[in-house]
Amino acid sequence: MLDSLRRIVHEVNAAHNLNEALTLIVERVKSTFKADVCSVYLNDPETGEHVLMATDGLRPGAVGQVRLSPGRGLTGLAASRSEPVNVDDAPSHPHFEFIAATGESPYHGFLGLPIIRRGKPLGVLVV
């Protein structure tokens, strides 16, 4: 597992731009963890919304279009708490919200990992 994570970090560090880095992250994390979906939401500093910026497994057309208000859904919960949210049965969780625009299936497992740099939340990695 650590070797896989090191390879991901190495590839991301070699990326030419943010979009390439985010695409590498979602593809490699999805593959490494054998997940159905991996996505990255980044915070919009002007609105505070969490914007879907990369995905492997959701509708590609949703990238840049899906915006979650602060605290919305399990993704917003992970961001607002600045700590991981790991749920076995996401649809039964009180913060769960189905986002039809992503084309998501009714997945049950949810892992939301806040992306934090120097104590500042930047977004959420969702697996």
Image (cartoon, rainbow, N blue to C red):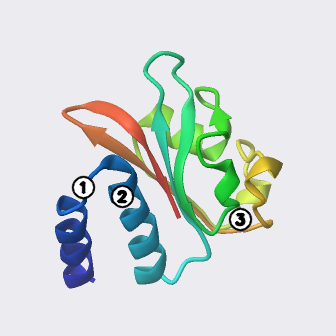
Q: In the image, what residue occupies the spot 75% across and 44% down?
A: 94
Q: How many marks?
A: 3
- Helix or strand or loop: what does disc 3 sit on? loop
- The type of residue carrying mark 1 is His
Looking at the picture, does residue 18 appear above or below residue 70?
A: below
In the rendering, which numbered label is found on residue 89?
A: 3
Spatial CA distance of label 3 from label 2 is 32 Å
Judging from the image, what secondary structure is the residue with disc 2 in? helix
Mark 1 and mark 3: span between their CA atoms?
37 Å
Determine whether label 2 and label 1 are within 8 Å by CB: yes
The CA span between labels 2 and 1 is 7 Å
In the picture, the disc for residue 16 is: 1
Residue depicted at 56% across the width and 37% down the height: 51
Q: Is residue 94 left or right of residue 69?
A: right
The amino acid on which the numbered mark 2 sits, given as a three-letter code, is: Glu
Q: Is residue 45 visible?
A: yes
Q: Is residue 100 left or right of residue 37?
A: right
**Front: mark 3 or 2:** 2
Q: Earlier in the sequence, mark 3 or mark 2?
A: 2
* Label placed on residue 20: 2
Sequence-wise, the earlier of marks 1 and 3 is: 1
* Residue 98 locus on image (x, y percent): 79, 50
Give the residue type that dot 3 points to.
Answer: Asp
Please indicate, yes or no, whether residue 98 appears anywhere in the rendered image.
no
Q: Measured from the top left, where is residue 91 in percent x and y?
A: 78, 57
